[in-house]
Amino acid sequence: MEVISFVALAAGLMIGLGAVGACIGIGIMGGKYLESAGRQPELMGELQTKMFLLAGLIDAAFIIGTGIALWFATANPFLAQIANLPK
Amino acid sequence: MAAQGQEGHGQTAGEYIVHHLHHLQTGKQSAVADFSVVNMDSVFYAIVLGMLGCWLLWLAARKATSGVPGRFQAAVEILVEMVDSQAKGIVHNAHSRKMVAPLALTVFVWIFLMNAMDLLPVDLLPWFTGKAGIPYQRVVPTADLSITMGLSLSVLLICLYYNVKIKGPAGWIHELFTAPFGDKWFLYPVNFLMQIIEFIAKTVSHGMRLFGNMYAGELIFMLIALMGGAWALNATGILLAIGHVVAGTVWAIFHILIITLQAFIFMMLTLIYVGQAHDAH
């Protein structure tokens, strides 16, 4: 029972903290992109490619964390380990 | 879920996920890295999609006209020009570009097609193969760490090849020991260590990024399928059915962005890493 509750908490923290970081990062980057596009509109196309590239890079760590958290939440691997422990 | 339910052996949600995350393997995997086991489903779909991509591009090239292009030819031309302009901006060596730009195009098209398998309904192909007697099936090759790490290792080998080719064996070994900190004998071990760490980190993060995105996406599609599968079980089921359609639509539309973006990022990083192999320090 303890394992289930701890893993549930851990999954929440993994998704939540990852989302905090990724959202702050994307927010700062998107803001800077709009700022720079406002200053120099002729660079917009070039910057947009780079912004999407970085958005993908920032998002990746968060999505990986979400995937692992969802795996823990739906098919908890630690329960199997506990079942295999010598009594 | 529905398919398995009809066959008379009900599953819990966990069992459904575990079953769907199991590869069709040639043997039983005994360790985390077990090189005697082949994930046949990933290899099969990767080869089929690679051939499909080659065939599509070949078709466009064969039917190409210098007159007014049709829609298909225009689409392929936009794609080729996009990759070509990115390659020109990153790899400043016209001779290498003859090899690297087609490589980038192939990587982009192939990874895009493999990622696009995620947009098929999660139970569609496993259901068909299940009827044919094949117990396990995962249809997204890039959601398999073996495939993505294989791709990133191939990129590493190409980088090493260009390092030796452009700088010469002696020049490259000189760079391994003198960059990034400088040409002093007491800095040689630190420099070498840094270079090795850089190569390992680049390769691992290259493969893990693609794998993580596709794996998470696939898992979320499975959870949405589970939500739809549970609709007949309880009183508020109709809400679950509606939620299933809404969530599936939203996630699939968002996923179109993700699969294109991840294929694009893999292509860009391939170009950047090969470009780094051309830069002398």
Image (cartoon, rainbow, N blue to C red):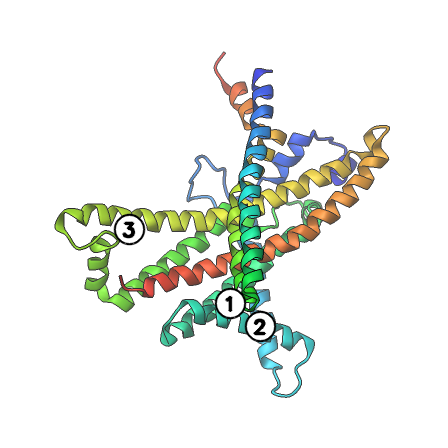
Q: Which residue is the site of mark 3? A: B195
Q: In this view, does B105 lie to the left or right of B67?
A: left
Q: Which residue is the site of mark 1? A: B105
Nearer to us: label 1 or label 2: 1
Nearer to us: label 3 or label 2: 3
Neighbour tally class for label 1: few under 14, some 14-19, many 20 plus, Cα within 10 Å: many
* Residue B46 x/y as whole percent: 55, 56
Residue at screen point 57% across, 50% down: B41
Residue under disc 1 on the same chain as residue under disc 2: yes
* Residue B233 x/y as whole percent: 82, 30
Task: Find numbered disc 2 in the image and state the secondary structure of the residue it sits on.
Answer: helix
Question: For residue A63, which quarter of the picture?
Answer: top right
Taking B169 as reference, is B243 above or below it?
above
Q: Label 3 marks which chain's residue?
A: B
Q: Earlier in the sequence, mark 3 or mark 1?
A: 1
Which residue is the extreme one toward the bottom? B67
* Residue B106 x/y as whole percent: 51, 66
Q: Which residue is the site of mark 2? A: B57
| Residue type, numbered disc 1 | Leu
Residue under disc 3 on the same chain as residue under disc 2: yes
Q: In which quadrant will I find the N terminus of chain A? A: top right
Q: Is residue B96 left or right of residue A25?
A: left
Q: Label 1 marks which chain's residue?
A: B
Which residue is the extreme one toward the top? A87
